[in-house]
Amino acid sequence: MEYWSNGVMGGGRPNTPLLHHSNSSVIFAMAVANDESPLVRELRSLPGLRLKLAEPLARYTSMKIGGPADYFIDVENGAALAALLALLRRHHLPVCLLGNGSNVLVSDRGVRGAVLHLSGEFKKVVWHDAGEFVRVTVGAAYAVTQLVREAARKGYAGLEFAEGIPGSVGGALVMNAGAYGSEFEKVVEQVEGVNTAGEPIIFCRDEMTFTYRDSHLPAGTVVTRVAMRLQKAEAVAVSSKLRELVGKRKSSQPSGFPNSGSMFRNPPEDFAGRLIEAAGLKGTRVNQAQIAERHGNFIVNLGGAKADDVHQLMELARAEVHRQFGVELVAEVKLIGEWGKI
Ligand SMILES: Cc1cc2nc3c(=O)[nH]c(=O)nc-3n(C[C@H](O)[C@H](O)[C@H](O)COP(=O)(O)OP(=O)(O)OC[C@H]3O[C@@H](n4cnc5c(N)ncnc54)[C@H](O)[C@@H]3O)c2cc1C
């Protein structure tokens, strides 16, 4: 059975003996750390991969929260990715992609199956002068902020809106990340990726449908490269626009504590942050997780917060906003891993 849930793809249960007593992630993680199953031997034999067993995910997320991934796999190049996906499919192992982890909430119990993280070849960028405009072809693991700043230095306009979005190009594309009136869909020309079988796929812009915070790619697509079209402009003007937007961001968003950006999508004609503030919830805490004082749609980790604490705050915000205003808030962050009842 194929299933997808909040960015987690799967094809049944892993065929390792490790899932039998998985109530405690600690016991589970220790068991996985000693795993020398045929699957692990196969994974270790594939070139272009770095495998870590029972790897805690907190260090890979902007919220600094998240339990262990059974199989955390750094993938260096396209050939390795194709071989890996084919192998994981053969073993019916669930697969989840992690970019810069800036739009996820990873469960304290961690993620069963494989978590893939792109690096190496997926961090390349190529600039191409196409006459009236410029085309940049950039790997999915490239940092959005780095791309934005390079474009500004070169005097290429179109990506200024993305300054301060701490994601990878792949994650930003999948989320159709946006701010200040623009979104990735405005600059995307073509997307390259692989499907669940590890086969290459290409989507041209006119074959794609973007909506608010969604690029509607087929379930299981791993984005590997994105081509974007930027406009030639004055470097001074692009840099000045960047500075203006950095200032706006600084004055409206909490800084200093780890977070995942906006927790909820904005409902039509309104703002999730405004509704949460109007519900009187700013500053509300569950243990070390807090609805930010500065922005109602941010939850900050004051130090040592658990995913369950954040999840409880999200449920509280959802319930109160619904009770007081009749509005159903929808999560923008992707909940990844094993979630039980609170
Ligand atoms: C301080 C702060 C400010 C933010 N500001 C904004 C903002 O202004 N606008 C905005 O839209 N967002 C914002 N975000 C949210 C976040 O940065 C964006 O959604 C970002 O694009 C996510 O990219 P990522 O690489 O971190 O993705 P992740 O969080 O790692 O993943 C997000 C989703 O994309 C999937 N994914 C990641 N990479 C790939 C890939 N290569 N192929 C297939 N699927 C993939 C994951 O499985 C997951 O479902 C902010 C976050 C923070 C912490």
Image (cartoon, rainbow, N blue to C red):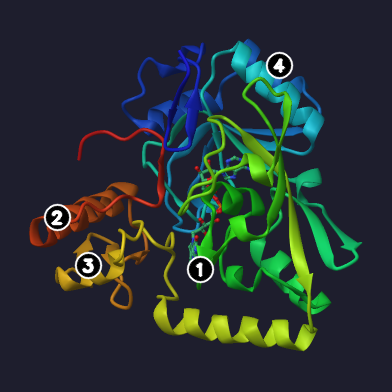
Image quadrant where residue 38 sits? top right
Q: Secondary structure at mark 3?
A: helix
Say what amino acid the circle numbered 3 marks: Leu
Quarter of the figure with the N terminus: top left
Dot 2 or dot 3, earlier in sequence: 3
Cα–Cα span, label 1 and label 3: 19 Å
Say what amino acid the circle numbered 4 marks: Glu
Question: Does the Cβ of the disc 1 residue fall within 8 Å of ligand 1?
Answer: yes
Residue at the spot of label 3: 275
Cα–Cα span, label 3 and label 4: 50 Å
Drawn side of residue 311 relative to residue 138, left or right: left
Can you see residue 40? Answer: no
Residue at the spot of label 4: 42
Dot 1 or dot 2, earlier in sequence: 1
Cα–Cα span, label 2 and label 3: 10 Å
Dot 1 or dot 4, earlier in sequence: 4
Q: Secondary structure at mark 4?
A: helix
Residue at the spot of label 1: 179
Is disc 1 surrounded by few (<14), some (14 to 19) or many (20+) residues within 10 Å?
Answer: some
Drawn side of residue 127 relative to residue 305, left or right: right
Residue at the spot of label 2: 322
> Residue 171 or 62: which is nearer the viewer?
171
Dot 1 or dot 3, earlier in sequence: 1
Q: Are marks 1 and 2 in contact (CB under 8 Å)?
A: no
